[in-house]
Image (cartoon, helix red, strand yellow):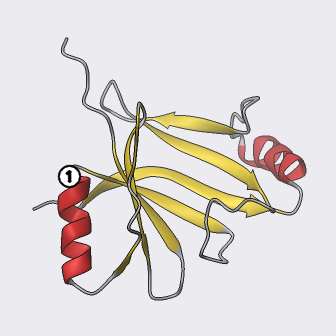
């Protein structure tokens, strides 16, 4: 069974999100959009990687106190979560399903929250 098959997004907090976004845009050439991040297209036509900076007050990474969270792409979220649970990992009992796909979370041994994402099915061409 394949587990992680890519990076779905990289998210981190900043004391001054606007200034940090401007620094990344100015110094690294990242095309930060009005919504606060950017996307990097994948080779597949329906995929992309999201890059975004969250306010320092955000609770999106809780219970982790880390200033970042990596989103990994998986093909079968429920199967991966089941295996992680069986291996004794700290898996969040919540799973979020939306038009954007299905999301689950696990904590690493250092206390970093990791987001696992199963993208939505591609519409038939």
User: Quick one: quadrant of the C terminus?
Assistant: top left
Q: Which of 41 and 65 is in front in this view?
A: 65
Q: Which residue is drawn at 15% across and 60% down?
A: 2
Instruction: Check disc 1 and report the residue beneath it.
Output: 76
> Vertically, is 7 above or below 44?
below
Q: Which residue is drawn at 61% across and 70% down?
A: 62
Q: Which residue is drawn at 73% across and 61% down?
A: 13
Q: Is mark 1 on a helix, strand or loop?
A: loop
User: What x and y, as percent, mark residue 94?
Assistant: 41, 61
User: What x and y, as percent, mark residue 109?
Assistant: 45, 88
Circle 1 residues within 10 Å: few <14, some 14–19, many ≥20: some
User: What x and y, as percent, mark residue 14?
Assistant: 80, 61
User: Quick one: quadrant of the N terminus?
Assistant: bottom left
Side of 34 relative to 98 (left or right): right
User: What x and y, as percent, mark residue 37?
Assistant: 67, 40
> Vertically, is 29 above or below 78?
above
Q: Which of 99 and 69 is in front in this view?
A: 99
Q: Which residue is drawn at 55% across and 55% down?
A: 10
Furthest residue in direction top, as rendered: 125
Q: Quadrant of residue 66?
A: bottom right
Side of 50 relative to 120 (left or right): right
Q: Which of 19 and 79 is in front in this view?
A: 79
């Amino acid at each position: 069974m394949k587990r992680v098959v890519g990076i779905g997004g990289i998210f981190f907090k900043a004391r001054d999100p606007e200034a940090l976004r401007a620094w990344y845009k100015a110094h690294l050439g990242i095309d930060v959009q009005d919504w606060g991040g950017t996307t990097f297209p994948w080779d597949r036509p329906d995929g992309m990687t999201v890059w975004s900076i969250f306010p320092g007050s955000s609770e999106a990474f809780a219970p982790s106190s880390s200033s970042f969270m990596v989103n990994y792409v998986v093909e079968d979220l429920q199967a991966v979560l089941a295996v992680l649970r069986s291996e004794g990992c700290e898996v969040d009992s919540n799973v979020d399903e939306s038009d954007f796909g299905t999301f689950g979370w696990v904590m690493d041994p250092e206390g970093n929250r990791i987001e696992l994402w199963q993208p939505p099915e591609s519409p038939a061409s």
